[in-house]
Image (cartoon, rainbow, N blue to C red):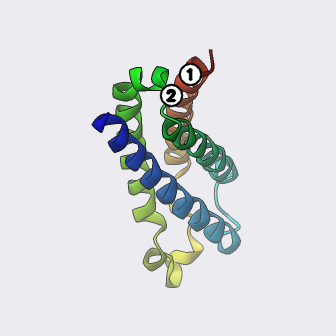
Amino acid sequence: MAELVGLIASVGSLAELTLSVFTSLYRYYGDVKSGPTASADLRNELGVMLNVIDHLKESLKSDTPSLQVYCNVLGGAVAELTWMIKEMEKRVAAEKAKGINRLKWPFSKSENEEFLTRIERYKGTINLALNKEQM
């Protein structure tokens, strides 16, 4: 039960962090018209991920027994995703978007692609657990 409570708290923190990065990326998009094409994909995927995280948080709060079985797997995915989002947040933080830096997209094309791949993987892991819960 303590694992579940910890996971719920972690998912809540992850949701807030993801929303922060998602919002910052939209701010960058307004300032940086020359950002890589994949930047729109990155923002969109973070938006979808935010919805998945919110769904996970609500499912965990409902104390679904089948999700408790996946606590370890979900805990690992949430921890890794949180670390990745924190790394993204460092690059899009308001203090980084000052002066000339505000005109430069914070991620390279290859970094965008890596983030997209990792987000897709975490989203798949979480959705798999959520789909098993509904069976």
Q: Which residue is mark 2?
A: 64
Furthest toward the top, the residue is 135
Residue type highlighted by circle 2: Thr
Residue at the spot 49% in from the left edge and 37% down from the top edge: 60
User: Few, some or many C-alpha atoms within 10 Å of disc 2 (few <14, some 14-19, many ≥20)?
Assistant: few
Q: Is residue 97 visible?
A: yes
Residue at the spot 50% in from the left edge and 26% down from the top edge: 125
Query: Is residue 110 rendered to the left or right of residue 32?
Result: left
Q: Is residue 107 visible?
A: no
Residue 19 point in image, percent of width and height: 56, 59
Q: Is residue 64 above or below residue 135?
A: below
Query: Is residue 109 rendered to the left or right of residue 89?
Result: right
Residue 2 point in image, percent of width and height: 28, 38
Residue at the spot 51% in from the left edge and 85% down from the top edge: 99
Looking at the picture, tell me which residue is in the foreground, 125 or 99: 125
Circles 1, 2 touching at the beta carbon (< 8 Å): yes
Query: Is residue 14 rendered to the left or right of residue 123?
Result: left
Q: Quadrant of the C terminus?
A: top right
Residue 107 point in image, percent of width and height: 51, 56
In the image, which disc is placed on residue 133? 1
